[in-house]
Image (cartoon, helix red, strand yellow):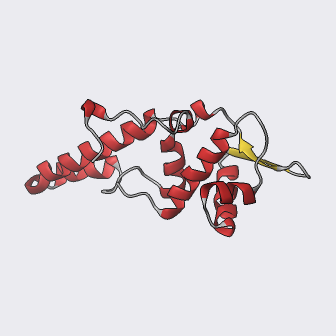
């Protein structure tokens, strides 16, 4: 699965806001510095997240951005779908199911692609912002005890 640079930036910005949830609003400049993101591009991403009601902005001297919901209520899949569209490098699930039915010569291949898509979607749908900002010294648990290579 490939996430666009915009998608990666959106996730990094959400992580910064998740770390500061419940304490203060965060200025765009501070998000950009904390996440090492280009400020102008970040403005566009935050506007998209605001329009989707994932973040909110506060005006004034103490203004900035903050999450509208608790980090535990925001799934990574929500951010990726908003910014990058369907959670699949091979098209959406309905398209793959259709190919399985209409292209019998390649049914097994499309079946594998559907399994890959479903596995990626399951991970992103079950992982919240809180899961990835909790303790950055611990890596996310790997399925089946596999070690990072």
Q: Quadrant of residue 46?
A: bottom right
Q: Quadrant of residue 47?
A: bottom right
Q: Which residue is the extreme one toward the front? A: 137
Residue placed at 18% from the left, 53% from the top? Answer: 102
Looking at the figure, which quarter contains the N terminus?
bottom left
The vertical placement of 39 against 106, above or below, is below
Residue 134: % across, % down: 55, 33
Q: Residue lying farthest right?
A: 61
Answer with left or right where residue 92 lies relative to residue 38.
left
Looking at the image, which residue is at 24% across and 42% down? 115
With respect to residue 96, does 119 lie above or below?
Answer: above
Residue drawn at x 91%, y 52% is: 61
User: Could you tell me residue 21's position as x and y percent?
Assistant: 70, 36
Res 91 → quadrant:
bottom left
Q: Left of 114 or right of it: where is 41?
A: right
Residue 78 vertical placement versus 42 (above, below): above
**Residue 82: x and y, percent?**
54, 51
Q: Which residue reaches farthest left?
A: 105
Query: Residue at position x 35%, y 43% from top?
Result: 120
Residue 31 in the figure: left or right of residue 146: right
Q: Please indicate whether residue 37 sits to the left or right of residue 113 in the image.
A: right
């Amino acid at each position: 699965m490939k996430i666009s640079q915009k998608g990666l930036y959106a996730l990094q910005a959400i992580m910064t806001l998740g770390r500061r949830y419940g304490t203060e609003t965060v200025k765009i400049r501070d998000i950009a510095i904390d996440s090492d993101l280009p400020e102008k591009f970040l403005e566009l991403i935050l506007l998209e997240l605001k329009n989707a009601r994932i973040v909110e902005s506060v005006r004034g001297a103490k203004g900035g951005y903050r999450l509208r919901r608790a980090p535990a209520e925001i799934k990574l899949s929500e951010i990726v779908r908003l910014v990058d569209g369907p959670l699949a490098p091979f098209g959406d699930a309905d398209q793959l199911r259709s190919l399985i039915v209409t292209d019998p010569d390649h049914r097994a291949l499309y079946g594998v692609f559907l399994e890959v898509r479903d596995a990626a979607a399951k991970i992103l749908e079950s992982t919240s912002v809180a899961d990835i900002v909790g303790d950055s010294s611990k890596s996310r648990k790997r399925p089946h005890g596999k070690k990072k290579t």
